Image (cartoon, helix red, strand yellow):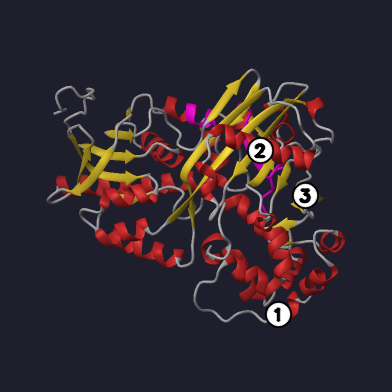
Amino acid sequence: MARAGAVSHVIPSTKRDVVVIGAGIAGLAAARWLVQHRPEIKLTVIEQDTRLGGKILTERVDGFVIEGGPDTFLAYKPRGVGLCRELGLEGRLEGTNPDRRRTFILREGKLFDLPEGLTGLIPSHFGPMIRTRLISPLGKMRMALEPFIPPKAPGSDESLASFVRRRLGREVYDRMVEPLMGGIYAGDGNRLSLAATFPQLRETELRHGSLTRGMLHARRHKGNGHQQAPRRPASAFLTPRTGLAEIIEALERRLAGADVRKGLTAVRVAPLPGEGYRIHLAGLDRIETSSVILATPAFVSARLVEGFDPLMSADLESIQYTSTATVSLAFPLSAFPRALDGYGYIVPQAEGRPILACTWTSTKFPHRAPDGFALIRAFIARAGKEDLLAADDQALVLMVRTELDQVMGVRTTPILQRVFRWPQAMPQYTLGHPDRLARLERRLDAHPGLQLAGSAYRGIGLPDCIASGEAAAAAALSHVQSMEKERRR
């Protein structure tokens, strides 16, 4: 029963088949998968916030489409496009502007073209790397020695920074790979696990003895196999026309018949005697369920399971997170002395700036701003620099305006500004992450019907999170069905 005076949320007394805790993209994908594969399932979704979608947050204002969190997803990872197709959104997907493919790197206050052909952080074409002014002649000579560097013997996990410096040299890492990596993880490459972030690099080193030889081998054998390679999409990144919130809105419609509860906080999960779980809610009664999917940040999941599995809780708690913020500003195009002739720029940590990256959103996606206007989005803070976020919103806006003044000569007052803060938002796959995941898998085996999903485990992108939620849903349904078979015997 609810406490006297508490807001009334009636929770059905019938035991649930599955409860999904957390309604970000992973939790919603899990719930939708369950409804699709078993429409009669007794399903409850619990979300602490008053809206669904987690870090996907789109605002549509006066013709501007403003993303507070992610703005695209990788086209080649199947479950992003796959889910959009199943939701009827495939025809609304748009790629990045094909006429403005340039991306820049900031160095000593000036913008330099990012060399073409960087595949998985590693150069795949020689010409652009030879011509780039980002790397000194000595740095290029060091990079040219890569085929002669012997592979490291198999053993313990290695950091991403250590691997790239070992194979390609410090300059390539500091001036190119580090800012690219920072744009993905907002992390410290000296602490990020190579095996958890870019395992294909280590596999290439071990298989071919060299990244260069591996790249040449891939180019020689491209399309020579008996099976035709899948066609790559025209754009590496896709997004619905009016923002990623279209996906959340479509998922919410698909769950219209399910028991979706917003504004509820799960405080504890406890196994029931025999089978199933009891979920305790803040200020409310409890829900009993055969299976539970924790699609919450790892530190939240740690608190939920602490009472019955402290070892699992400790491993979940050890997954670190970085806080970030995005600031979106709109200006008349006339405010820019230089053409916005690319997707924006990334900033190496060595530059010592508060800005991690600056996206020229209205160039990257022209439909995101009315004609004659520019929409700019800056990312603030990275691992080790989160103290910047102690500043208030106006101070964050001032940081971005100062950046635009210094780098692009923009001194006009923005006609629109939005600040989005994301505390503990970016999971960090630090050294030892694969071993941590293996331990979590063993602990989950000891608790049938309990599943984990989300960005903290095997990929932070939207397609990874969707796949994670759907895999958890399939495992939960399998458990429910096995319990039903047992009861019928």
Measured in 3D between alpha carbons, the distance from the residue under mark 1 to the one under mark 3, in whole angstroms, is 33 Å
Measured in 3D between alpha carbons, the distance from the residue under mark 2 to the one under mark 3, in whole angstroms, is 14 Å
Badge 1 amino acid: Ile
For the question of whether residue 181 can be seen, the reply is yes
Identify the residue at horizontal 38%, vertical 59% (top origin): 318
Identify the residue at horizontal 61%, vertical 29% (top origin): 66
443 vs 128, left or right, is: left
Circle nearer the N terminus (1, 2) = 1
Badge 3 amino acid: Gly
Magenta residues span: 229-249
> Which residue was labeled with disc 3?
109
- Position in image of residue 472 (x %, y %): 38, 48
Measured in 3D between alpha carbons, the distance from the residue under mark 1 to the one under mark 2, in whole angstroms, is 42 Å
Identify the residue at horizontal 75%, vertical 37% (top origin): 405
- Position in image of residue 370 (x %, y %): 72, 21
| Magenta stretch: includes residue 240 | yes
> Which residue was labeled with disc 2?
400
| Magenta stretch: includes residue 17 | no
Q: Quadrant of the N terminus?
A: top left
107 vs 293, left or right, is: right
> Which residue was labeled with disc 1?
149
Circle nearer the N terminus (1, 3) = 3
The mark lying in front, picked from 1 and 2, is 2
Identify the residue at horizontal 68%, vertical 58% (top origin): 350
- Contact (Cβ within 8 Å) of mark 1 with mark 2: no
Q: Regarding mark 3 in the picture, which secondary structure is present there?
A: loop
- Position in image of residue 205 (x %, y %): 64, 73
Circle 3 residues within 10 Å: few <14, some 14–19, many ≥20: some
Badge 2 amino acid: Val
Q: Nearer the viewer, residue 483 or 351?
A: 351
